[in-house]
Amino acid sequence: MAAEQVVVLAGGQCALFCVAQCVLEPGDEVIVAEPMYVTYEAVFGACGAKVIPLPVRPEHGFRVQAEDVAAAITPRTRALVLNSPHNPPAPACRVRPGRPWPNCASAMTCG
């Protein structure tokens, strides 16, 4: 990787803000698992994008379910934020072979 391909930022929120400004446009949707960090709506809202909350449920160990993500995807979906480990219960994200994540990801189109 060349030095021209590396960006160093002050922290996670700064990085998220910079990426959002580069890739999101007004009206775009960002799926975010909740409970979410309190600044996410402002970070994405600053470029006119809308946060689509995705509740995590105790019966699934507070883990994001691919089926729930797939159901939340619309033609305006441009991003999915996966915070791992997720708070407050802090389960880590894992992709298991045979699970529907690849189908979920292929449903998101950009452009």
Image (cartoon, rainbow, N blue to C red):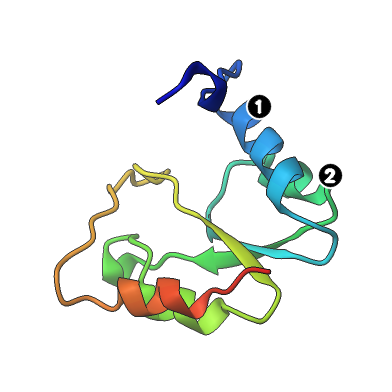
For the point 76% across and 42% down, which residue is it? 21
| Labelled disc at residue 46 | 2
Name the residue type under label 1: Cys
For the point 60% across and 19% down, which residue is it? 9
Report x, y in % for residue 96: 17, 65
For the point 34% across and 60% down, which residue is it? 62
Report the residue marked by disc 1.
14
Q: Is residue 61 above or below residue 3?
A: below
Report x, y in % for residue 10: 60, 15
Report x, y in % for residue 84: 37, 44
Q: For the residue labelled by badge 1, is the local secondary structure a helix, a strand or a loop?
A: helix
Q: Is residue 96 above or below residue 76?
A: above
Q: Quadrant of residue 2?
A: top left
Q: Is residue 74 above or below residue 89?
A: below
Q: Is residue 64 left or right of residue 81?
A: left
Quick one: 11 or 62, which is closer to the camera? 11
Q: For the N terminus, give its image quadrant.
A: top left
Quick one: 34 or 12, which is closer to the camera? 12
Q: Are marks 1 and 2 in contact (CB under 8 Å)?
A: no
Name the residue type under label 2: Ala
Quick one: 38 or 25, which is closer to the camera? 25
